[in-house]
Image: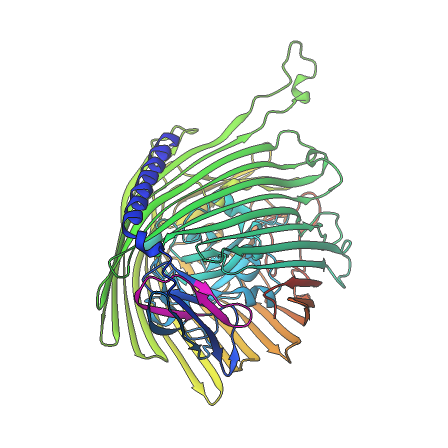
Amino acid sequence: MNKYFSSTIAAILILLLGLQLYADTNTHNLRMKTDANIVGHVISDGKHVPFVTISVKGTTYGTVADETGHFRIIHMPVGEHTLEARFMGYKPAQLVVIAEQGTTKEINFYLESDALGLEEVVVTGDRNERRRSESAVIVNSLGPSLFTNTHSVSFADALNYAPGLRLENNCQNCGFTQVRMNGMEGTYSQILINSRPIFSGLAGVYGLELIPANMIERVEVVRGGGSAIYGSNAIAGTINVILKDPLVNSYEVGINSGFTGIGMRNAGSIAPDNNISFNASMVTSDQNTGLSVFGFTRTRDPFDANGDDFSEVTKIENTTIGARLFHRFGMRNKLNLDFYNIREKRRGGSHFDRLPHMADIAEAAEHKITTAAINYHQFFRSTDMLTVYASGQLIDRDTYYGAEQSLADYGKTDNFTFHTGFQYKAQFSNASLTAGAEVSGESLTDKKLGYPDWESAMGEEDFDIFTENTTVADQQTLTSGLFAQYDYMVNKFMFSLGGRLDSYRVEDKEKNFDPKTGVIFSPRANILYRHSPELQARLSYSQGYRAPQIFDEDLHIETSGARQVIHTNHPDLKAETSQSFMASIDQNRLLGNTSIGLLVEGFYTVLQNPFVMEFGEPDDNGVVEYVRENADGNAIVRGINTEINIVPGRSLSFAAGFTLQKANFEEVHEFGEKRFFRSPESYGFLTANWNLNPRWAVSASGNYTGKMLIPYFGPNLENPEEGELRESATFWDMGTRVSYNTRLKSSGLQIFAGMKNILNSYQSDFDSGIERDPGYLYGPVLPRTIYFGIRVGSMLR
């Protein structure tokens, strides 16, 4: 694979060099100092709007208004140009200007409020920038204000606040989390970083909590099959993490502390959670080069919720640094470079003052994650765009999943993932065509480390007490794909037809199975009907697939004194495919001064050859094997997502979402059940934000989780090996936040405090002791928690 990757990267670099030579010969005149300058300001409701992005259409060039709402663009190419002003919360505005050599012209933008975000530009729906109201699929955006108002320290914390999404914790020891979309578990959703599927299965074990919120500009969520655009695993939908771009010279530093377990009886000590973050951006005066840097550090103590000296909330130490760089070689091209490094230690169980193998139970993992990416954009014709990209991720993970002072449970995992390709978007008068090719690959080696076997050496002569390392998994995957999408607009309709042809190869070198190969075509079709700017209707059909490879849960060992649970694939496991249907109505109206938005979305997904887990029984060493195999018959997931947004004015807003769904197999499986486990039939969220005045703000947020089926294999049963199926309670997780803003010369200062899970709506029947079932976990991730902190930054208002 490394040889294949090197060849691919070499081809990409040659292509980039050729494109740059083309750009140099065709944009030389664009870099001349024409002294054709544009100055102006941006106003809304009689007030200047700071930090608005001003871009020149058909180019990569632009600038950002300063904190007073004024901007300038120098040395414009002579001729006619269209300028666009864009800022979150406002409708984009365009003006045409003729740049003349040696002349400075003034143009001013007047922006209208867009309280519901209908004109916000999104990229995840079809891999291109498009206004949300013009996207063929519904795209929800989770922005910085949501991260702030819900006190979301990590990427995971904000995922409960989009329709159809629900974050859950699956391990009482190590805090293995996943996000369910439309009732399907996390492996059915594709996590993207800057629109690239570089988030590997190993990263997915703990990755939702690994990514700090301060490195994220926004998160875009697309529900429904996305394999036609993004490849394998995008059956339930796609979650795109978009990192912060350098836009203007700025900085921000934040410090906050939280305390988990406030007011809980029969619990362990209150657990502190301390975080420090910083961001800085620098942009040259000609706007041709920009650099943003970010850093984050977190220290969270473990928390024992039931007083048995075993943790329910994981200990975490995280340090993250990263940077994003752009450079414009000319008016019509742009190069982006991304880099970040995450180092995290996490541990759950008992005896945290000892080495892992000296504890009664320890699930510990130390990650070193390094990710780098390069993207090159080149305009052709008027607004055609070619994008060439490559990204890679290295993960070095050291683990211990063991109990009762075992020395045999240390492990080491090495993972390399790469993704590279190109796409070209051709724009016509009433249509567009996007097409491209991609290659993705992954190499994963998981080893159980050797140890001194004192017990076997007793009474033996010439016995080597040190065992050898044992390879548990050695897998390589390679996927090549071609994709295309054609959009055609006529009257009030937009018809979108796309497809992706993937050829995959999964090779298990450890088990010496024959490589699993396949060629899968994933089509999708969408219809958008824009009755008016306020009312849109959408219909969509898509197919998706999951290749038979190692998934995130396979790289986590659920551990107790009674048993260890490992996950494996059946030798005859086949690819899982899906067919998804979605229909939605999106109504947005202005009633007086109040903006109201209502979304109703129905979904129906058929899973063919669905993956299910066949539960095994403990062997003599207490190891239980869960084998992933294809179920008999299909599985069906269907339901309705609703979302309502009410904005009475710029100082007050409300949002809520609710999902009703059913998910079941056609044939019974474990415990004689057809229903999906850990999949409630109802769940939802709400948020409210109120700016009392320019200084004070109050926000509230909450999540509702309905009843669900949870397997239990704990010591409280007469036959723990057989287990039983239990039904959980319902939960209301409510929180609030209060902030105060003031000025420190040229910077803003914010002081804030709040509480999560005010009602302490939290699981009350955790298993206890060394033989507990750590997988018996459900409901909110944290009990009642208070927090406070400060933020200082040049862009705080």
Is 313 contained in the magenta span?
A: no
Question: Which residue appears at 64% of the width and 75% of the height?
Answer: 697
Q: Nearer the viewer, residue 445 or 550?
A: 445
In the image, is residue 528 above or below residue 173? below
Q: Nearer the viewer, residue 437 or 73?
A: 73
In the image, is residue 330 above or below residue 746? above
Question: Which residue appears at 38% of the width and 54% of the height?
Answer: 234
The percent position of residue 86, horizontal first and vertical second, equals 43, 70
In the picture, residue 662 is in which quadrant?
bottom left
Q: Which quadrant of the figure contains the C terminus?
A: bottom right
- Residue at the far top: name it: 462
The percent position of residue 766, horizontal first and vertical second, equals 66, 54
Q: Which quadrant of the figure contains the N terminus?
A: top left
Q: Nearer the viewer, residue 605 or 123?
A: 123
Q: How is the image coloured?
A: rainbow
727 to the left or right of 59: right
User: Total marks drawn?
Assistant: 0
In the picture, residue 468 is in which quadrant?
top right
The percent position of residue 320, horizontal first and vertical second, equals 59, 47
Q: Nearer the viewer, residue 557 or 220?
A: 220
In the image, is residue 722 above or below residue 741? above
- Residue at the far front: name it: 102
Is 82 contained in the magenta span?
A: yes
The percent position of residue 549, horizontal first and vertical second, equals 40, 41
Q: Which contiguous range is marked in magenta?
A: 63-86
- Residue 607, can we see it? no
